[in-house]
Amino acid sequence: MPSTSLDKHRPVDKDTSEISEAVSTDSDIAAEKAVLRRVDWHILPWISLVYLFSFLDRSNIGNGRLYGLEEDLALKGNQYQVAVSVFFATYVVRPTLNYSGNRNINEGLIACRLLLGLAEGPLFPCLIIYLTLFYTRTELAVRVGYAILGGALSGAVGGLLAYAIGYMDGVQGLRAWRWLLVIEGLPSVCLGVFGWFFLADSPETAWYLSPEQRKILILRGTRNQREAFTVSAGTLHRADIIAAVKDWKIWAFSLFNFGGDIQLFSYSIFLPTIIQAINPAWSVIYVQALTVPCYVLSAIMYFVSAYASDKLQHRALFGILGSLVSIVGHIMLMAGRDVAVPYVGCFLIASGLFTVAGIALAWLPTNLPRYGKRSTAVGMQLMIGNSAGIAAPYLYPTGDTPRYIMGHAVTIAILVFSAVVSGVLWWAMANINKRRAAGEEDWKMSGLTEDQIDELGDESPKFVYTT
């Protein structure tokens, strides 16, 4: 089967016999922990920051709306919703630089949002695949959590920045929303340049590790995929791409992610508008401040869920619970007539917001040991999940204020669907694990060598799915 080198971020084993021999013995635990800490310090802060500002870039249009963006650009009807959704048209198609606030016509806003989506489309899929090269199956949810943390904190940071930038309205003749786009866009450019020079392409090229430490890191990766590891499994094959497209579980994961993203994108864009509708007497700056604690809670809840998920090596339950908690929050926003009930509802939605989306992203790649199938699957999952961003802006039209019944009702229905899909995946993979443990799939290994069995990837009777 021919292989390609389409992606330089793939692990390539240099000495199969040496790896195989080393896997049978334990690495020094203290040395391994030291390597892991060093890798964490060089990867996780950058990932958190780059996704934080990436998320700010796409969602700060919601903060800018309260500072007169619609009025200044003469947006009418659903033009604001169009401007929000076109970002995801190019974001879904493919994964160049940031946009600024120096255009004052509707066409300019649309063009900037399209270019922003084109630039940021590949970011998160590549972050997920990059993490799988350095971390094991039992560590991935927490490490993905650092990227999710950036997205969650972007709401808090965005609220605080919007609060402060509100006082710049009129400085140098620019409205506050223009300053908002410029100030929040610049860090993304700087981080992109920094990451090009700072990040290692793979464990083999981790410049911040000694040769012995790099060897330990490579051995960890080998043990991580011990049920289905071969040199060939670490390269990209056309057959893996086809296998990913034909695997129903990957489509189910994508639908699960779609449900979480519908809520994530609509909440991140419209939270300031929703809170403003709770009490129109609140000032714009006060509303921006009220968004901050919601996002802080969302970050905390995801990390608690991710930590417990990695410890228990169980994913589905946390996704289902996150969906249920968020559903209660949406019901409170629809039913609440005073200030307290709907605002508490915003906190409940935040509690499940990143848990639903984040667990789905951490769950899929841990169950695909072959690099080619894993890369394709993550791309499929995020393409379908991010397409939710095209529809999400239209769930909360201006005319539905203050209760936004349609938006909350549709989100509830999709979250129920997402929870059901998560439950089906849980049941299906647990059932496969049970059959494999009972030897009911051992016929697949008949007549095959050990290497050929390992080449089967997640289809191997030896492979155990994380549920």
Image: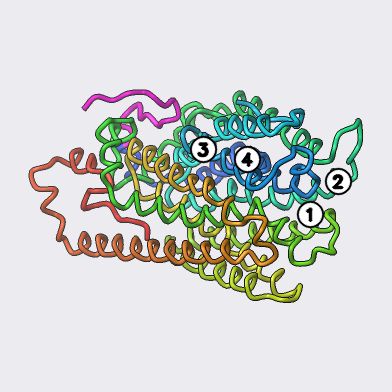
Instruction: Give the side of residue 183 with respect to residue 329, left or right.
Output: right
Specify how the rendered protein is coloured: rainbow
Q: Relative to 367, is 194 above or below?
A: above
Residue at image mark 4: 83
Residue at image mark 3: 89
User: Mark 2 near mark 4, Cβ–Cβ under 8 Å?
Assistant: no
Amino acid type at mark 4 = Ala
Residue at image mark 1: 288
Q: Residue 166 carries which label?
A: 2
Q: How far apart are marks 2 and 4 (CA)?
A: 22 Å
Amino acid type at mark 1 = Gln
Q: In which quarter of the image is the C terminus?
A: bottom left
Q: What element carries label 1?
A: helix
| Residue 88 at least partly seen | yes
Mark 2 surroundings: few (<14), some (14-19) or many (≥20) residues within 10 A? many
Of the pair 155 and 66, the residue shown nearer to us: 66
Q: Quadrant of residue 18?
A: top left
Amino acid type at mark 3 = Ala
